[in-house]
Image (tube, grey):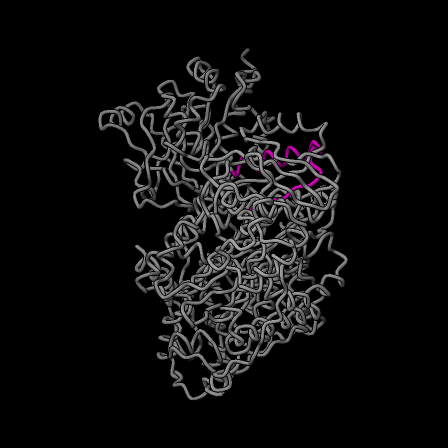
């Protein structure tokens, strides 16, 4: 967010307080060690008690990797993330295709735009009932796909989805590791954060 | 021994039989304990001495040789703390200091590969944490039996998943290391883990208990029955021919990386609030080691209430509590008026903490349990341990091995045969693409990783404003060391030094993990002594200190020891990571230059191994002066933007270095070889590197190389989609990649 020009504010898991932020990113990591099931314990964190209603009321929320898993566990997004197809953790730079720009996190991209962004996960295979997958596709809620096939066995090469309103986005790849070619494979990921910053600016101007 | 084996009971029952042999103590050592105490030890004291005097904790066989490393520290202006502390601390400028160390977890990783390797990462991370530093990266140097051996299919995937599971969860980038295969490691895999931490100069913490009346706090995980006797029985004895599968399984610890993450953040907050007087991590020998070392390092006394220790299993005896190697625990010395604030920080991080004792001035370590005194010893006697001057002798077969050199082995000379040899080497498990392993590691977490595998060294940014960074590499070559441990160790040192230099960094410090067979074998002791002498002399010549390390002995199955395998880690400082050099060819039309001198040197080489399964002769010569000039040249060239890439030459020589540079950069090249093509392609002469020059800067580089007195030969130019060797052969990059990347997935799935 700092690279994109916004001020990052840390939220503490045990606080019932969103500190008046314009948007929330649930980052990657291993909340509670991924014990039980990824994100299954973190969804009960006190801060989630504030986040869930705020997200339902339209707060832009981006979940990356473990954050995506938490959003699914919290039922802000449909489906679930399960063990990679080969049962091993995978870290690789992958090509992604943007397939949905009607979210505050992808608005600065163009449909069909390709990005190089790392994936790093052990449980990144997106699964959902066939009917849910069909509905996601039909309503344009699949917003990022693996361009060269899912490295983790994700259904229909899904790398990221949004909720029906568009304000909540979950992504398995890590755009925060693609903000500077010095420390990542590209700066392609910056667009996710720049999109949100542009959205606040728009919201501010309209208010 | 019964629950009531107090000091009083021990004094009144001198004839009671005690299981000292089962705990790994010799008869002489047991007698020495009795002499020191003036009575027989209690069961708890016997347990304490047995782990503290184990080879693993006391370095009793290696200490006399390790003393030779200490003088290397005196020559460095960079060192803030050296050997003896948990890990050395190196000044890297701009107010920053780093601490780094490499440690073995070989035996546990053979018995239970996943947990053994995982807790190897956890242990070295706590070592670094205990210095007051924030751990910022890890590396792993791992060695196995033949890649296609049945047991390697059990051990390797388990070790890799353990390192991946623990390091990734902990949020530490894994930025490099080594993967090697050799039949000598079939019954004794080597799992060496390195951690590096960052601090400000004044954050250095000491492992001492000072200030009478200060409280001793044990915090982190509860103490359980896992890893009881791991240091004494498991890590300090040879595996029997049953492969250690019978009695030793319960001795491997189980890791909880999430608890370690909480412990890391908790400790860093405690440091920042200045709530700690002294701190010690709990690793091998658990509470026994932490209490004796804190007490011995401080005012010399401590009293401990063992009933206060939070247990996972209430049935543990005092001896088991002392020996438990339950992971994710730390011990701190805290001023009484800071205890409440200390506990608040622990609560914030959901870390359990209990005051278990206090610092005293009576020179005695006293522990009570259920109303009786079960330990009452002078802590220094346990902390110091015995020192052995073990007999050493040049191994009987060494002269024969060295006489049977590679000179008579059939060598390829025609183009197609050279091509086949290159592909065969490139596809051999030790030189093939290691992504099957490294893809399981998160090298990017924390967002500061600039270079990681497959580059020559890992490079981490320290300061975003100035670009200050650190580079790290580890190297070892058991084959060279078995031919000549002195020279082989210097070759490992030279290679790690060179690898760090290839990033554009300046090497400043050394850590080492000495993996050897049984110290009770005079031949092994000779190898150890020679390796340490080689390291000490090498570091003196290079002018960089050894800041710490670890010794792992008894790496053998039955009477067959592993190759002597010192693994050397070198730390470098990079003045601006934005000017780093990668190993891959960075663009087309760049001049390719070979630095250094190539001689026909094939003893212990990858070619001799892969093509002939041959080990004999002498390893390549070492020229540390040339290594220094080469490193200085690359650093200067990186600073001036004269180079586009730099890759060191090591196993497999120029041929493999060219293939790797092409594959990493996705760029072909065309080269012309002078002299004997086989020697040019596959010799392993040290002190060499392959660089590509930034187009337009060719004259500048020639001048710079001349100024640094480094031989430089233009061998070709980058570009195209194949590796072309004029007049000999051409290999399309697609074919190179296929051969290189197919090997490990074909074996491990």
Residue at 58 percent across and 59 percent down: it is: B550
- Position of residue B597 relative to residue B118, above or below, is below
Residue at 35 percent across and 78 percent down: it is: B416
Report the side of A191 relative to A111 (left or right).
right
Q: Is residue B504 visible?
A: no
Most foreground residue, B582 or B317? B317
- Magenta-span inclusion, residue B162: no
Question: Residue most toward the front?
Answer: B12
Residue at 61 percent across and 34 percent down: it is: B356
Most foreground residue, B294 or B435? B294
Residue B303 position by quadrant:
top right
Pick the quarter of the image with the C terminus of chain B.
Answer: bottom left
- Position of residue B561 relative to residue B126, above or below, is below
Q: How many marks?
A: 0
Report the side of A44 relative to B66 (left or right).
left
- Position of residue A43 relative to residue B575, above or below, is above
Q: Is residue B97 visible?
A: yes
Where does residue B302 sit, x and y in percent of width and height?
Answer: 68, 41
- Magenta-span inclusion, residue B279: yes
Where does residue B647 sit, x and y in percent of width and height?
Answer: 54, 64
* Region rendered in magenta: B260-284
Where does residue B409 sit, x and y in percent of width and height?
Answer: 40, 85
Most foreground residue, B499 or B276? B276
Where does residue B30 sit, x and y in percent of width and height?
Answer: 56, 59
Most foreground residue, B352 or A200? B352
């Amino acid at each position: 967010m700092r690279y994109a020009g916004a001020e990052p504010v840390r939220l503490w898991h045990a606080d019932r307080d969103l500190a008046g932020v314009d948007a929330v990113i649930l980052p990657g990591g291993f909340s509670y060690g991924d014990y039980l099931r990824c994100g299954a314990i973190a969804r009960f964190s006190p801060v989630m008690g504030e986040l869930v209603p705020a997200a339902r009321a339209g707060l832009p929320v981006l979940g990356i990797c473990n954050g995506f898993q938490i959003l699914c566990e919290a039922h802000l997004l449909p489906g679930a993330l399960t063990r990679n197809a080969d049962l091993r953790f995978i870290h690789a730079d992958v090509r992604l295709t943007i397939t949905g720009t009607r979210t505050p996190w992808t608005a600065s991209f163009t449909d069909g735009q390709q990005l190089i962004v790392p994936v790093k996960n052990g449980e990144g295979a997106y699964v959902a009932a066939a009917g849910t997958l069909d509905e996601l596709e039909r309503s344009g809620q699949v917003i990022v796909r693996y361009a060269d096939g899912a490295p983790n066995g994700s259904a229909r090469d899904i790398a990221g989805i949004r909720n029906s309103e568009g304000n909540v986005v979950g992504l398995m790849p890590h755009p925060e590791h693609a903000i500077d070619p010095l420390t990542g494979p590209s700066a392609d990921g910056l667009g996710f954060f720049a999109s949100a910053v542009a959205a606040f600016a728009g919201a501010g101007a309209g208010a | 021994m019964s629950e009531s084996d107090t000091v009083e009971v021990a004094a009144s029952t001198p004839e009671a039989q005690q299981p000292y042999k089962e705990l790994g103590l010799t008869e002489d050592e047991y007698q020495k304990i009795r002499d020191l105490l003036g009575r027989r030890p209690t069961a708890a004291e016997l347990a304490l001495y047995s782990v503290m005097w184990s080879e693993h904790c006391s370095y009793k066989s290696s200490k006399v040789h390790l003393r030779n490393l200490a003088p290397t520290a005196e020559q460095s202006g960079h060192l803030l703390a050296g050997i003896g502390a948990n890990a050395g601390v190196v000044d890297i400028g701009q107010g920053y200091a780093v601490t780094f160390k490499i440690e073995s977890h070989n035996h546990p990783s053979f018995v239970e590969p996943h947990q053994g390797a995982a807790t190897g990462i956890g242990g070295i991370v706590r070592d670094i944490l205990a210095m007051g530093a924030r751990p910022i990266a890890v590396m792993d140097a791992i060695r196995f039996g033949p890649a296609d051996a049945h047991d390697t299919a059990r051990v390797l995937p388990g070790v890799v998943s353990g390192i991946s599971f623990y390091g990734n969860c902990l949020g530490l980038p894994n930025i490099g290391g080594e993967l090697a295969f050799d039949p000598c490691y079939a019954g004794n895999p080597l799992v060496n883990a390195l951690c590096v931490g960052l601090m400000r100069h004044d954050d250095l913490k000491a492992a001492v208990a000072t200030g009478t009346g200060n409280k001793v706090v044990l915090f982190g995980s509860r103490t359980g029955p896992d890893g009881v006797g791991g240091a004494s029985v498991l890590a300090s004895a040879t595996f029997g021919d049953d492969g250690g599968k019978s009695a030793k399984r319960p001795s491997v610890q189980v890791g909880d990386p999430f608890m370690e993450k909480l412990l890391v953040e908790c400790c860093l907050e405690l440091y920042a609030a200045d709530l700690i007087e002294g701190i010690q991590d709990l690793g091998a020998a658990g509470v026994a080691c932490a209490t004796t070392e804190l007490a011995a390092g401080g005012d010399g006394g401590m009293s401990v209430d063992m009933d206060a220790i939070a247990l996972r299993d209430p049935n543990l005896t005092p001896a088991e509590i002392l020996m438990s190697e339950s992971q994710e625990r730390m011990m701190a010395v805290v001023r009484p008026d800071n205890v409440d604030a200390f506990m608040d920080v622990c609560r914030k991080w959901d870390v359990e903490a209990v005051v278990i004792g206090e610092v005293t001035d009576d020179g005695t370590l006293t522990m009570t349990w259920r109303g009786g005194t079960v330990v009452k010893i002078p802590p220094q006697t346990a902390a110091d341990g015995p020192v052995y001057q073990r007999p050493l002798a040049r191994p009987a077969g060494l002269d024969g091995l060295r006489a049977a050199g590679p000179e008579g082995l059939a060598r390829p000379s025609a183009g197609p045969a050279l091509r086949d040899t290159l592909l065969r080497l490139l596809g051999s498990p030790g030189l093939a693409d290691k992504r099957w392993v490294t893809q399981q590691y998160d090298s990017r977490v924390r967002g500061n990783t600039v270079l990681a595998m497959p580059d020559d060294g890992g490079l981490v940014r320290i300061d975003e404003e100035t670009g200050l960074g650190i580079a790290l590499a580890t190297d070892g070559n058991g084959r060279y060391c078995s031919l000549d441990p002195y020279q082989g160790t210097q070759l490992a040192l030279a290679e790690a030094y060179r690898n760090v230099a290839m990033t554009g960094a300046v090497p400043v410090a050394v850590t080492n993990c000495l993996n050897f067979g049984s110290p009770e074998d005079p031949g092994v002791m000779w190898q150890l002594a020679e390796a340490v002498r080689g390291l000490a002399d090498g570091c003196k010549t290079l002018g960089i200190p050894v800041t710490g390390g670890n010794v792992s002995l008894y790496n053998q199955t039955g009477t067959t020891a592993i190759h002597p395998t010192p693994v050397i880690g070198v730390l470098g400082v990079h003045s601006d990571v934005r000017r780093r050099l990668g190993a891959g060819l960075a663009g087309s039309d760049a001049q390719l230059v070979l630095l250094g001198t190539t001689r026909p040197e094939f003893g212990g080489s990858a070619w001799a191994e892969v093509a002939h399964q041959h080990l004999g002769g002498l390893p390549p010569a070492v020229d540390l002066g040339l290594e220094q000039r080469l490193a200085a040249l690359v650093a200067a060239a990186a600073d001036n933007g004269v180079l586009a890439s730099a890759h060191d030459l090591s196993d497999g020589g120029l041929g493999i270095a060219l293939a790797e540079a092409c594959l990493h950069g996705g760029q072909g090249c065309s080269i012309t070889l002078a002299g004997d093509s086989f020697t040019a392609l596959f010799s392993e002469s040290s002190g060499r590197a392959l660089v590509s020059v930034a187009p337009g800067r060719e004259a500048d580089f020639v001048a710079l190389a001349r100024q640094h007195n480094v031989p430089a030969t233009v061998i070709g130019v980058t570009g195209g989609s194949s590796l072309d060797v004029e007049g000999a052969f051409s290999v399309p990059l697609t074919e190179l990649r296929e051969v290189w990347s197919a090997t490990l997935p074909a074996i491990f799935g």
